[in-house]
Image: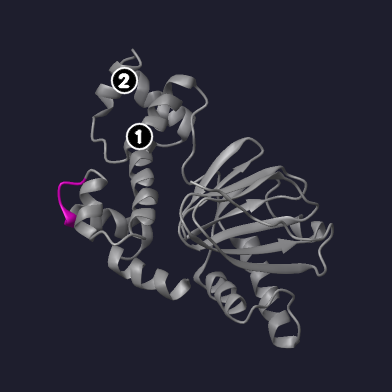
Amino acid sequence: MSKKHIELLPFSGLPAPLYFRHAHFHAHSHALEHRHPWGCLEYSAHGVLHMEIAGSRFMSPPQFAIWVPPHTEHSFYSPQPITYRAVCLVPELCEALPQQGCTLAISDILKAILKDFAVRDVQIPDGAADQRLAEVVLDQLQQAPVHDCYLPYASSPALLGVLEALQAAPGDNRPLADWAGQIHVSERTLARQCVRELGMSFGEWRQRLRFLASIEALDSARSVQEVAFDMGYSSASAFIAMFQRQAGCTPEQYRRTSLQNR
């Protein structure tokens, strides 16, 4: 498996208050840990975005984006191909945005403008119409709901080991009691630990993991039913219902939309 290095932007300061970047990254693309004086909204229109920001891991599906504040160390790795879009902002425009790395739920309006700029290869908005669109982008960013992380990770080694085992095998259907026995605690203790460290139940975390894993699996030629079974579902209908709750569309609709966004 050969990794493909992602070239960083070739300047130390942004050439405009808002700078837009668009790229298609191959599987196993990566950018080593770095920082820059501007803030950056990083978004994958197709595929799951994997980042590490100030020591915290982030995974983000296409209905979310990841915010990296100015001067914050971060790195990037893409196990699958992704359609990458980014909005870089000078520090003055970052003051109304979160001061720590986080996940932002982005609107359909923002997605549409980013897609339009990518299709037309707009990096620096030029002309009154594109400048107005850039102002809408900034307004939408400032209004975007903040989430600490779509798929948070544990701080304790025991729970982290459980989560990493699940990430290696998202279709593992063992109940919480089995995982608790594996790390020698009671089921109730492990359930409380999940809520305390993850901010959600074990079941919710596993469902989010399966959703992210299914996004990457749907990039293959496998049928929806095959992906459903791989994710631990006993029927395609149960998998489709989960996917629709998370994405707002069916797996087949997601596939069609993803083809348009590549």
Give the mark nearer the N terminus: 1 vs 2.
1
Cα–Cα gap, marks 1 and 2: 13 Å
Q: Is residue 42 visible?
A: yes
In the rendered image of this protein, does residue 149 appear above or below residue 11? above
Looking at the magenta stretch, what is its main secondary structure? Answer: loop
Bounds of the magenta segment: 233-237
The kind of residue on which mark 2 rests is Ala
Q: How many numbered circles does the render carry?
A: 2
User: Magenta segment: does it hold 27?
Assistant: no
For residue 75, side relative to residue 77 (left or right): right
From the top left corner, tell me how far across and down residue 48 is, in percent: 47, 54
Q: Which mark is residue 44?
A: none
Circle 2 residues within 10 Å: few <14, some 14–19, many ≥20: some
In the rendered image of this protein, does residue 109 appear above or below residue 87? below
Circle 1 residues within 10 Å: few <14, some 14–19, many ≥20: some
Which residue sits furthest left? 235
Q: Which residue is mark 2?
A: 180
For residue 225, side relative to residue 191 (left or right): left
Q: Which residue is mark 1?
A: 166
For residue 238, side relative to residue 183 (left or right): left
Asked whether the residues under the numbered discs 1 and 2 touch, taking CB atoms below 8 Å apart as contact, a structural biologist would say no
Query: Of helix, strand and loop, which one carries label 1?
Result: helix
From the top left corner, tell me how far across and down residue 253 is, in percent: 32, 70
The kind of residue on which mark 1 rests is Leu
Residue located 19% across and 57% down the image = 225
Residue located 81% across and 70% down the image = 16
Residue located 80% across and 56% down the image = 91
In the rendered image of this protein, does residue 86 appear above or below residue 28? below
- Asked which quadrant contains residue 250, the reply is bottom left
For residue 82, side relative to residue 223 (left or right): right
From the top left corner, tell me how far across and down residue 52 is, in percent: 60, 42
